Image: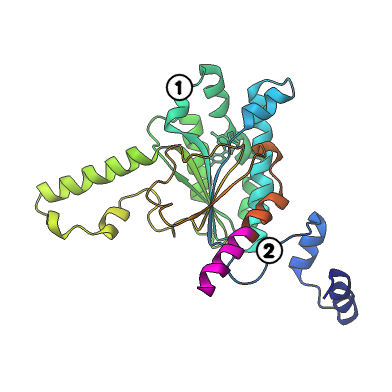
Amino acid sequence: MSIFSRWLGKLRFGVFSENDLKREQVKTENEPTGENIPRHVAIIMDGNGRWAKARGLPRIAGHHNGMKTVKRITKAADRVGVKVLTLYAFSTENWKRPKAEVEFLMKLPQEFLSLELDELVENNVQVRMMGNRELLPDHTLAAVEEAVRKTKDNTGLILNFALNYGSRIEMVDAAKELARQAAAGIIQPDAIEEADFERLLLSSGLPDPDLLIRTSGELRLSNFMLWQLAYSEFWFTDVYWPEFSEQHLFDAIREYQRRARRYGGL
Ligand code: V07
């Protein structure tokens, strides 16, 4: 059935849902539907600096535009029924960048939240943060904690920011805690199971990502969710993060659905 006749039918019978209207506002043509929408999508938002450089702009202009993409993609993911969206905003390695760039990046959570928190609350989105809180500037942490607190009882999309996150240190910290518990006689080393380790990871309580997206042509994990991505589907694009659109997200999800169907057929 064509889109046209589907809409004609809806017009005649007056069964426009709220989602139809939202869809119309954005006008995407390849919106995934049906079974097998990935529950958890994780994204490495790469290429902001390169996007800026290609336009003769400073790197921070790329980061700032990347922030606008965060809003667009959060709404699109929510609309198609993704339950958890994890975004890699700042890695433990990113501290090595020039001081001025790091300072700019550390202001983005506040800026993003001052613009978007009200709407996130309205849309029942739950904001979380995954990463080491200790090294974050007070102003950054305060803004994030406020968003986490104000949205903690929300039951819609979980928007999980990986901020000062590194997967190896996450696992080392989990191992240390298990070692402490073993030394204290709380657990038996031989009885340690995957679930015991998993409970100590920063993503504890979330399902593993079904789909990992990385933008900007890089084909690496860069210390991102090494444990949690063990069984995930990967999708890469050359598009720089500031130019990543709803259409790209939907392409990735449709490809995920195709792969899931193929496995089902075996
Ligand atoms: C950052 C924009 C997106 C592209 C990647 C680098 C730059 C949103 C946040 C954010 C983080 C936590 C939070 C709310 C928003 C953010 C950093 C960088 C450090 F609770 N975008 N964004 N944080 N960029």
Q: Give the mark, 2 or 1, whose residue is nearer the N terminus.
A: 2
Instruction: Label 2: state its secondary structure.
Output: loop
Residue 123: give its label. Answer: none
Residue 261 rendering spot, x and y as whole percentages: 57, 69
Instruction: Label 1: state its secondary structure.
Output: helix
Q: Is residue 99 in view from this perspective?
A: yes
| Tag 2 residue | 32
Question: What residue is drawn where x is 40% and y is 36%?
Answer: 133
Question: What residue is drawn where x is 69% and y is 26%?
Answer: 52
Residue 96: give its label. Answer: 1
Q: Amino acid at mark 1?
A: Lys
263 falls in the magenta region: yes
Q: Nearer the viewer, residue 72 or 53?
A: 53
Asked where in the image residue 61 lies, by quadrant, the reply is top right
Residues under labels 2 and 1: Cα distance?
39 Å
What's drawn in magenta, residue-wise?
255-266
**Majority secondary structure of magenta residues:** helix
Ligand 1: quadrant of the figure: top right
Residue 125 rendering spot, x and y as whole percentages: 58, 56
Asked where in the image residue 66 lies, by quadrant, the reply is top right
